[in-house]
């Protein structure tokens, strides 16, 4: 809850003082869909995109409203941005297509697709592969891998239909992977497998979409302050152990991921596609 309040305060402060924090808004008038936008990394990206001038579609199973946390799309709107909420199960093909249509009805196009939504069942109860229920694997893959596939597919289909920008670009797809897509972690067979698939899916989709001027890249966060970490770190000692795994500044926060997400959706990444950027405080350097 403290994280959400900090994000809300930070967004509000930056949004009303853009001339101080940004020489220009890098995503001005671009339409962005962010899945899993109600909390954690997805919320951080949605707020930062709005501060950069994007028109934001917040997609999630629920808006995440509570007494202490304003819904992401409401916060954006209250601070002068434009945003809608689309109730979406990313593992359901019809739901994803409906999400795309919601964006088109409201804003008329899709420039940016951030496939962030994911689940981490093993954060609550890590189990070695020989004890892991098969249904846990299927459930995780359906959201964390198949959900990304659907987002890449249907957002890309729409982007191909749109007129290109003057530089030839038609769109930007950003997939949120994980450092556990590059290395293993005992007890997290489903999550690690799914995130590994996202990394290679990103490379392949980038090649498929390159002729159409559509960028496809990924970000691999390290351990980031989010609901997943809250589930893993039940006490201060456990949290300290997680923080110690990142040599630079310890545990990350959602804005540490939002920065690279802005870069990959901007003109500064004009010749970048098919890469996975680690935003991990040095985790993978070890």
Image: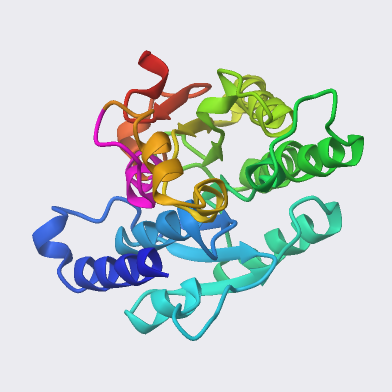
Q: Quadrant of residue 101?
A: bottom right
Q: Is residue 195 depicted above or below 257 in this figure? A: above
- Residue placed most toward the observer, 183 or 79: 183
Q: Residue at x 59, y 57 (%)?
A: 36
Specify whether residue 176 is painted magenta: no
Residue segment shown in magenta:
248-261
Specify whether residue 254 is painted magenta: yes
- Residue placed most toward the observer, 30 or 36: 36
In this view, the residue farthest toward the left is 20
Give left or right: position of 216 versus 94. left
Q: Residue at x 29, y 50 (%)?
A: 26
The x, y position of residue 286, in whole percent, is 37, 13
Q: Residue at x 58, y 47 (%)?
A: 116
Work out whether residue 95 can be spotted: yes
Give left or right: position of 282 versus 118. left
Q: Is residue 272 depicted above or below 33 in this figure? A: above
Give left or right: position of 179 versus 257. right
The x, y position of residue 199, in whole percent, is 60, 24
Work out whether residue 157 can be spotted: no
Q: In which quarter of the image is residue 134?
A: top right
Q: Which residue is drawn at 77% across and 57% down?
A: 97
Give left or right: position of 48 versus 145. left
């Amino acid at each position: 809850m403290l994280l959400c309040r900090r994000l809300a305060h930070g967004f509000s402060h930056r949004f009303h003082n853009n001339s101080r924090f940004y020489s220009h808004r890098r995503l001005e008038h671009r339409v962005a869909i962010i899945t899993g936008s109600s909390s954690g990394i997805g919320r951080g990206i949605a707020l930062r995109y709005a501060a950069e001038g994007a028109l934001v579609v917040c997609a999630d199973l629920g808006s995440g409203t509570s007494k202490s946390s304003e819904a992401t799309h409401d916060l954006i709107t209250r601070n002068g941005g434009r945003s809608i909420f689309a109730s979406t199960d990313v593992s359901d093909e019809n739901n994803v297509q409906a999400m795309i249509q919601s964006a088109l009805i409201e804003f008329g196009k899709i420039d940016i697709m951030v496939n962030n939504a994911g689940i981490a069942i093993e954060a609550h109860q890590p189990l070695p592969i020989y004890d892991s229920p098969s249904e846990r694997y299927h459930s995780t893959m359906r959201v964390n891998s198949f959900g990304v596939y659907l987002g890449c597919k249907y957002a890309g289909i729409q982007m191909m239909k749109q007129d290109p920008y003057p530089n030839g670009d038609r769109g930007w797809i950003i997939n949120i992977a994980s450092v556990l897509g590059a290395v293993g972690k005992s007890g997290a067979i489903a999550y690690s497998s799914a995130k590994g698939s996202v990394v290679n899916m990103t490379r392949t989709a980038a090649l498929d979409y390159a002729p159409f001027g559509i960028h496809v890249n990924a970000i691999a966060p390290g351990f980031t302050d989010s609901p997943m970490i809250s589930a893993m770190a039940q006490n201060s000692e456990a949290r300290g152990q997680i923080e110690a795994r990142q040599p630079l500044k310890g545990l990350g926060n959602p804005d540490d991921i939002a920065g690279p997400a802005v870069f990959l959706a901007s003109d500064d990444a004009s010749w970048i596609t098919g890469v996975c950027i680690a935003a991990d405080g040095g985790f993978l350097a070890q």
